[in-house]
Image (cartoon, rainbow, N blue to C red):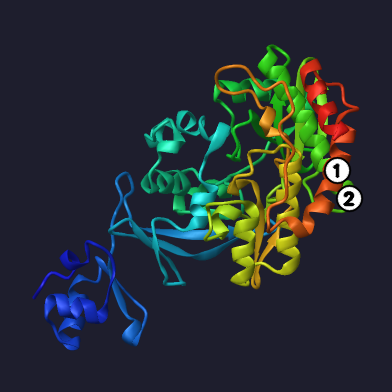
Amino acid sequence: MPDLRSHLMNGALTSAELRGAVRLSREGLSLAYDRESRQILRLGQGRATRYAARQNLPGLNTDEFPVFRVDEAGAIQPAGRIVTLVATESVWFPDETIIDGLPPEMHDVAPRGFLGRSYSRRHADLDLPENVANWSDNHILIALSRRGEDLPGNLVIGRESFDRFQQLRHETHTSDDFQRLSDNAIAGDHVGSSAGGEQPKFTAFVNGQHRIVKFATNATDNARRWQDLIALEHVALETLRDAGIDAAESQLLDLNGLRCLIVDRFDRIGDMGRRAVMTLAAASDQLHGTWTDSAEEMQRQRKLNDNGFHRIALLDAYGSLIANTDRHHHNISLYPTRAGYDVAPAFDQLPMAYAPPSSGNFRNSAVEQSYAAANTLAVWDEAHALASEFWQRAAKLQLTDSMQKIVRAHARR
């Protein structure tokens, strides 16, 4: 009897392809499968039947991981199972689609950014690379299935993370704790959900709401520039909200030289409730180009309605006009629905063109005026009015001299 698994090492095959490779009849293939069924999956029915070889990944004692979702009331419910396959593929049941790598939802919630960099140090027992940018799918699955009880969004993956979720309790914080929490975050000792982004931050449960707190000190010129940018982010979100455009609620707070931007999390409801979110990076097939390019493709695929496309195009144009050069696809979030996606509140809108570089001097003059792209022309006037309002409000802030000069140049335009 031929070894089926050896013929599946380069990926899944249809029933016809596998029969041809092993030179067996349908009945012979069925008997061979029964003999190797612990190592091989049979997916689909009839002519659509496919065969795939299971694969245990290093550091994990199984190739099968239960998946759960936490609802808005905090109850956890089964949501299928993930099986890892050879050739770096996986399949999420009950949907039997074979995926190259892990499902996009799992890449979406993996630790990254400023908080992600402390993850490996806090969980040294997992033996993960300290730099999350170097993580493989195997590393991501180890992190998610063993220490994934408090991920962004509403997924919980694996039995160990499920058990940890059952014991999860959130400490209540006040602004009196922010200095200590910011010190811990800088030291890499932050405990909490690993929200993305490079700006120093921590997560906290404050006044019955889960929040992300970005912070900057006044210790250096670079730090003071970040204080300016934090204040400008608050004004950028406030400008959108006041115009009736859904944006994350934010609060600006100064504490003895520490400036904090406190932003409400829209993937958390109360203490334990959660809501599913996906980034544009995970939801869109078009990862190269602008937010509007991806939204346009999703609209063509009927994953995004006209209102959703308008929102993303408007945020893209607004970001361009307020010098937000960091409009990557993880900075737009979406709510999955049965009909496709709705656009979640705007966040991370700020003039990143003026962020301090990792080396060298930061920019002290206003960038060139932005112009409409072909697919943002229809929203450009609306975005221009919003951006004008933003720069007028920004000009009234107490900022460093260099940033005040830049803001006034934009406001004059």
Residue located at (77% from left, 23% from top): 259
Q: Is residue 70 visible?
A: no
Q: Position of residue 218 (x, y in %)?
A: 73, 15
Find disc 2 in the rendering and name its residue.
243
- Above or below: residue 135 compared with residue 336: above
Q: Work out whether residue 368 or residue 120 is closer to the camera in this orientation and state it.
A: 368
Marks 1/2 in contact by CB < 8 Å: the verdict is yes
Give whichever of 51, 81 is nearer the camera: 51
Image quarter where the C terminus lies is top right
Residue 160 locus on image (x, y percent): 46, 49
Residue with the mark numbered 1: 239
Left or right position of 62 against 366: left
Instruction: Decide if residue 7 is on the left or right side of residue 343.
Output: left
**Tag 1: amino acid:** Thr
CA distance for labels 1 and 2: 6 Å
Horizontal and vertical percent position of residue 120: 45, 32
Tell me which amino acid carries mark 2.
Ala
Element under label 1? helix
Question: Residue 25 falls in which quadrant of the image?
Answer: bottom left
Q: Position of residue 31 (x, y in %)?
A: 17, 81
* Quadrant in which residue 409 is drawn: top right
Dot 2: within a 10 Å radius of its alpha carbon, few (fewer than 14), some, or many (20 or more) residues? few
- Name the residue: 66% across, 67% down: 304
Residue drawn at (70%, 24%), measured in percent from left and top?
226
Look at the numbered disc 2 and give the secondary structure of its residue: loop
Could you classify mark 1 by the number of other residues whose Cα lies within 10 Å: few (under 14), some (14-19), or many (20 or more)?
many
Residue 204 falls in image quadrant = top right
